[in-house]
Amino acid sequence: MPKFNFMTTVSQLDLNEKKAIIRVDFNVPLNEEKKVTDNTRILAAKPTIDAVLSAGGSCILMSHLGRPKGITPDLSLEHILSEVEDVLGQKVIFAKDSTGEDAKTKAAQLKAGEILLLENLRFHAEETAGHENFAKELAQLADVYINDAFGTAHRAHASTTIIAQYFDENKAVGKLLEQEIVAIDKVLKTGEKPVLAILGGSKVSSKITIIENILDKVDHLIIGGGMAYTFIKAQGGTVGNSICEDDYLDYTLELLKKAKAKKVQIHLPVDVIATTEFSNEKERKTLKANEIEDGWEGLDAGPKSLSLFKEVVLKAKTILWNGPLGVFEFSNFANGTIELGTFIAESTAAGSFSLVGGGDSVAAVKQFGFAEKVSYVSTGGGAMLESLEGKTLPGIAALKA
């Protein structure tokens, strides 16, 4: 059976009577009562766990939660145990450490069909330091290693990268990680044309490497959010008090030249919804994007911009959405982002492939009910961005070694 991107998949492993240690991403939000408020990441890990169990194996789950400095009871994975059991539909054994005696004993006693959840990996500084001895201790708990944590695949940590060296052929890419790789490849390599990327957010400087990497792969690029004003000002427009990175004006002009040379069509807002200060409550009016008066700042895309963007989105066959069109956290400036989500959902329903990835756009998609109406919503923030920048993720590279 051919390997997937030079990696073994879960279905290619012999898992019968084997213990699989799986790096999952259970870094989920908790409320003040320490209850899980969004179980998306736990749900995302279920197909891999189910596959191991149905193949006759047992699962040892390892994850981090938050950024603890040493043992931090508020960030114990024991808080999420009941949610994990609810999602997986069975009892889950909990170990009070990840490499101590409790973990070793419970792992040794684990039977086929059972699941063990280890305590927060980051209670040990050795995890983020990529410590070999710590990785080796984790490896000794199991027969097989599976990485299914895309959200941490860009980190060379003990559980995401270093551990893989102790498993030779007995390591595999999990089903979620496989889906993420396929989705990104569809945008950057194999997607049907025309390919459209939509980049939003506040700063050009944070998206430079993404723009540089995707110019060879896309046909259209919509630039929205705060970063659009740097492009508009660079071309001689007045942007009032809108967010603008004056240090990047020359650079944006160079980018526009590169895009033209590569025959990439760049689409910028032509009108914006502006206000007098960064607030949901102040007076609003629609202004031309390149004629924003002093004392006013654009916080959302205007109706003419949305009409132009709609046309581009509906013609696209492959769509990447990274970043909102406006300050969607303010209800009066959420319309652009909501409308864009509606256009992408319509294009997806008509057969396009749509990938939403990276922080704020994922939050917007969930908030406004588009998660089920796009092809794929990435589970990784930083990992997604680094993939779009063309970087090799250490957690994925380790599975190919």
Image (cartoon, grey):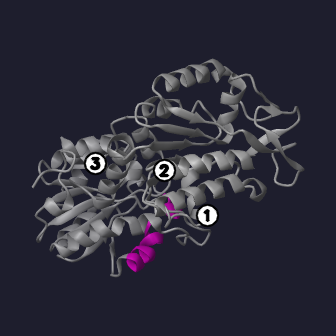
Q: Position of residue 76 (x, y in %)?
A: 46, 64
Say which residue label 3 marks: 134
Q: Position of residue 284 (x, y in %)?
A: 86, 49
Query: Between marks 2 and 3, how big is the CA–CA gap?
Result: 32 Å
Helix, strand, or loop for circle 2? loop
Q: Which residues, given as a range, are shown in magenta?
A: 72-87
Closest to the camera, between mark 3 and mark 1, is 1
Query: Between marks 3 and 1, how big is the CA–CA gap?
Result: 39 Å
Helix, strand, or loop for circle 1? helix
Question: Contact (CB < 8 A) between labels 3 and 1?
Answer: no
Q: Quarter of the image for the N terminus: give it.
A: bottom left
Answer whether residue 141 is visible to the viewer in this image: no
Q: Mark 3 packing: few (<14 Cα in 10 Å), some, or many (20+)?
A: many
Q: Quadrant of residue 130?
A: top left
Amino acid carrying label 2: it is Gly
What secondary structure prevails in the magenta region?
Answer: helix
In the depicted view, which residue is nearer to us: 142 or 271? 271
Placement of 48 over or under 398, stated as above or below: below
Q: Which mark is residue 367?
A: 1
Q: Quadrant of residue 334?
A: bottom right
Say which residue label 2 marks: 357
Mark 2 or 3, nearer chain start: 3
Magenta stretch containing residue 133, yes or no?
no
